[in-house]
Image (cartoon, rainbow, N blue to C red):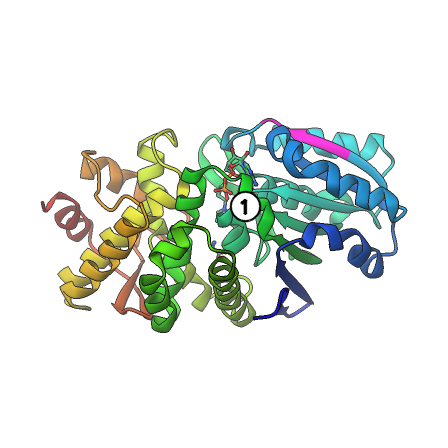
Amino acid sequence: MPQVLNIKVKVPHRSYDIKIGGNILADFPHQLKQLVEGRQIIIVSNSIIYGYHGQQVKEGLIEHGFDVVTYLVPDGEEYKTWQEAEKILTTLLEAGFNRDAVIAALGGGVIGDLAGFVASIYQRGIDLVQLPTTLLAQVDSSVGGKVAVNHPLGKNMIGAFHQPLGVWTDLRALNTLPEREWTAGLAEVVKYGVIWDEDFFDYLEKNVQNIKNRDLAVVREVIGRSCQIKAEIVGQDEKEQGIRAVLNFGHTIGHALEKVTEYKVYRHGEAVAIGMVCAAKVAVYLELCSVQIVERLESLLKKLGLPVEMPNVSSDLILGSLYLDKKVKKKELVLILPRRIGQVEIIRGITPQTIKDCIDRP
Ligand code: NAD
Ligand code: GLY
């Protein structure tokens, strides 16, 4: 396998590369210089991530002639807000950043979404580069151009589609990632197997131990294949008019669970794992797939260390939250449900009673 994987994302008005390898952050400043005219760049990160990986990026950029400003966001989902975006905008204005300036998001999905949102609106949009440092960000949030901040009334409610100029995915950045964050990111990896690629699901089943040990070659394969699948889907449907919705497998119920537990109990990936199992149970209930699909999915998720059981929360609370989800169009419940491993369908008109029965069933 090559040391650096290069995956192309082709969307109507922009094509860009995802570079995946062991020391990608070292190559990033030189490669960026070839891509952009401007020399003003802001690194948006948080103090934990910047403490581990920021200095290398900053020094590399300065060596390559960039004027570097740094903005550190406090750590946590609660800072993915309009208020924080406004502070970054103020920093850009005070530093005299023009339309050739670049925003570099060095971090997980929170930093990527927030910095990306600012890039989408500053002077009607400036270049964004994604330097993802969590597994979730490397396989999902850094790819595909969804950027957003949260509103008190709902997660990701203020946002845009703003594709990056490129994604530099450094596998070494994952060495400092806490175990729980690593495991949570694996839920999105399993998702790709279920929605798109049974061979990939088989590969994950056969490599559980290597994945848990973070074996470098296996990690590169897992991240690379996940990005290829996401690039393929986003390339077909950039703005989620159709097929891109399959990426939401497990997310509708997962988001509802995150919300009713006030974002304090589950990491996003953990809630998605429970949401995927619940969605698979709905598929069995509706006779769309066999119970073996649920068993296979549950077994892989459990072996990877992810939760699979819906906790003891009222199904009415979950249902109430489901109706607030932006994926619930005109009060019609739409879920992504598996037909088999490697194939899902967008199913409309699912009744609240069906969801309730599947959640309440032991
Ligand atoms: P996160 O960004 O909060 O990062 C998780 C934790 O890991 C944080 O405490 C962070 O400081 C720490 N961290 C990050 N990289 C580290 C590293 N290399 N070493 C040590 N610590 C590190 O969480 P996340 O799971 O990456 O992202 C979740 C966010 O992503 C949510 O806001 C979600 O809505 C968003 N998301 C967006 C998309 C999209 O398409 N835009 C897709 C999925 C999720
Ligand atoms: N994370 C879902 C999407 O990018 O569409």
Which residue occupies the foreground of this view, 56 or 10?
56
Which range is magenta? 70-74
Q: Quadrant of residue 206?
A: bottom left
Respond yes or no on whether mark 1 lies under 8 Å from ligand 1: yes
Residue 242: in sight, yes or no? no
- Say what amino acid the circle numbered 1 marks: Leu
Q: Position of residue 340 (x, y in %)?
A: 25, 70
Quarter occupied by the N terminus: bottom right
Name the image quarter holding the C terminus.
top left
Query: In which quarter of the view is residue 17 placed?
Result: bottom right
Q: Is residue 199 above or below residue 98?
A: below
Is residue 118 shown left or right of residue 323? Answer: right
* Residue ID for mark 1: 174
In the rendered structure, does residue 267 fall within the stretch colored magenta?
Answer: no
Residue 182 seen in the current view: yes
Direction right: furthest residue = 65
Q: Is residue 209 above or below residue 49?
A: below
Most prominent secondary structure in the magenta stretch?
Answer: strand
Between 236 and 353, the one nearer to me in the picture: 236
Give left or right: position of 35 versus 298: right
Query: Residue at horizontal 20%, vertical 59%?
Result: 294
Q: Residue at coordinates 51% horizontally, 56% vertically from top-left?
A: 216
Residue 335: % across, % down? 30, 58
Foreground residue, 276 or 216?
Answer: 216
Residue drawn at x 34%, y 49% is 252
Q: How many marks?
A: 1
Percent x, y for residue 269? 39, 45
Question: Residue 115 placed where, x, y %?
Answer: 65, 41
Identify the element where label 1 is drawn: helix
Q: Residue at x 68, y 48 (%)?
A: 120
Side (left or right) of 289 relative to 153: left
Q: Residues within 10 Å of mark 1 (few under 14, many from 20)?
A: many
